[in-house]
Amino acid sequence: MKAVADLLPEREPKARPTEFDVERVRRDFPILARKVYRRPLAFLDSAASAQKPRQVVEAVRRCYEQEYANVHRGVYYLSERATEAFEGARRKAQRFINAADEREIVFTRGATEAINLVASSYGGACLREGDEIILSTLEHHSNIVPWQLLRDRVGIVIRVVPIDDDGEFLFEEYEKLLGPRTKLVALTHASNSLGTIPPVAKIIELAHRRGVPVLLDGCQAVPHTRVDVQALDCDFYVFSGHKLYGPTGIGVLYAKARHLEAMPPYQGGGDMIKRVSFEKTEYADIPSKFEAGTPNIAGAIGLGAAIDYVSGLGMEAIEAHDQALLRYAVERLSEVGGIRLLGEARKRASIVSFLVEGVHSHDVGTILDRTGVAVRVGHHCAHPVMDHFGITGTVRASFGLYNTREEVDALVDGLHEVRRIFA
Amino acid sequence: MSELRELYQEVILDHGKHPRNFHRPKGCNRESQGYNPLCGDKITIYLTLEDGLVKDAGFEGAGCAISMASASLMSETLKGKTVEEVRALFERFRGFVMGQENPLEAAGDTPDLDKLVVLSGVREFPMRVKCATLAWHTMSAAMEGRKEEVTTD
């Protein structure tokens, strides 16, 4: 039963907003007002996980307090409402990344599960011993290990596109690696450790000329820029809800319908079947075929609310805001002596990794913590990037829609404190 | 902030920047590796054990100021101790970095503990306790001739 709202034509906003009032936005995030060690909090770790606006928390609460029941199976009012909300979230995800069909949106636990799903199901069915896949040095472990597990099972060969010391994806090397045995390219849309955005349009265009499908890991892209999977023409696209100001435990696998239709199921159970008997089981249509068991209903609804929130601000406005902060941060960090910025690609997400001369990243992080500044230190689940620079970890500051110039200033003040202590 | 000042006080910063016994002693007959993958602290502990006595101790490695300072301070206190004395020291050290023992009381009754007590500030930083204890757990493995790589992650 469709809701009336879904029958009305999509109303296009008159003009896409290009800026928003960050102070007003911050009031939507109660956690940002809290103190840590009696200092104001400067939360600069959205790349690890983003904070949630009231609107997302409210949507989850409303679900549990007023419209909760299991989805898809009930004939009673609450189940219909819950199913509407859940499938409504699916349509929101579809519109958010401009997928052609809502059946091309599979809800998963997160990007990691989404990639594992593709590696296991698509990889297991379509890739053979000796087939090659292309990854890059920039990849998060979640876009490396599932392919290694596939390699152990099936014997595929993994080829890796290197980076240079600016953290740039070396496109000429990618061209050389794309060969007659290449069967899949799986790359980050934006590096979580260096922020680098590879030239994805060119990458996909070249791969498709050779008949090779492409998977993009969009975890660090979707919070910061408008993503259009039809314009990109990627075959698979993954992202996690919790990095998009939504709840944990929910993520999206987008895949072209023809791929999903050809792929065998990933997990078996209820909801992904049409009919079960011990002799023969018939699987459900997509996307249900890939959604076994009771889904994270409230999580999906929360993700829908997060999508509404960022869409309300406007992705163009968010991108402008995040990029301006990135520029300001790079400028201010360059003024502090003994700071080495790592990876300064021409196109990057609002993430900055750096080293403090003579001070281990963990010590930097501990001291910054006590000044109220939250950054991540370590390898960021990107050992290959660390190995490229011959280091064990960096300090990483990442900027989201609620961050301010004052918080960048707090980071810089904290770094001066670090230098003072270790002088 | 006073907790920060206590953790990163002069002695610790000094040992972190200029670690003592930062080498493999000649005649070393025990060796063990320690590694915390989550933060990248890596350490090798070298001991020269003779007749149940630690004749010499040294270490090599790379890591945060806390892990290096702890290894450096430890290496100074081990020399000339019996294996039993070293075990007892380890127990007491663990006690006050994990907040189970009052460092001021600890300092009073055992020689060398007053040197190690400078690290007790780490009790206010639960995520960093493992950095302080890595050297000791690795040393313990070396002393007992255990082969597997040690971790405190």
Image (cartoon, rainbow, N blue to C red):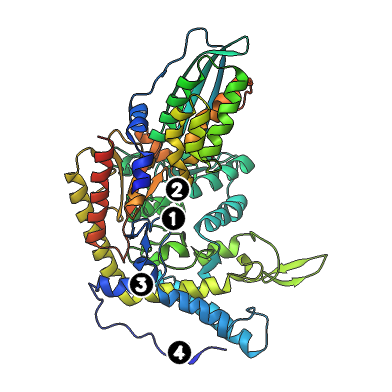
Is A264 situated above or below A419?
below
Helix, strand or loop under label 2: loop
Chain at tag 1: A
- Which numbered dot is residue A194? none
Give the alpha-carbon distance from disc 1 to disc 3, as whole Å: 19 Å
Give the alpha-carbon distance from disc 4 to disc 2, as whole Å: 39 Å
Chain at tag 2: A
Instruction: Tell me the residue that label 1 is attached to.
Output: A217
Choose mark 4 or mark 2, whichever is in front: 2
User: Which image quarter: residue A25?
Assistant: bottom left
Rendered residue at 45%/72% (across/down): A93
Is A402 situated above or below A150?
below
Q: Residue furthest bottom?
A: A4
Report if the CB atoms under discs 4 and 2 are less than 8 Å apart: no
Q: Mark 4 belongs to which amino acid?
A: Ala
Rendered residue at 79%/66% (across/down): A280
Do discs 4 and 2 share a chain? yes
Can residue A176 be seen by looking at this rendering? Answer: no
Task: Tell me which numbered mark, 3 or 2, is placed earlier along the sequence.
Answer: 2
Is A219 situated above or below A32?
above
- Which numbered dot is residue A310? 3
**Crowd class of label 3 (few under 14; some 14 to 19; many from 20; radius 10 Å):** some
Task: Tell me which numbered mark, 1 or 3, is placed earlier along the sequence.
Answer: 1
- Which numbered dot is residue A5? 4
Helix, strand or loop under label 4: helix
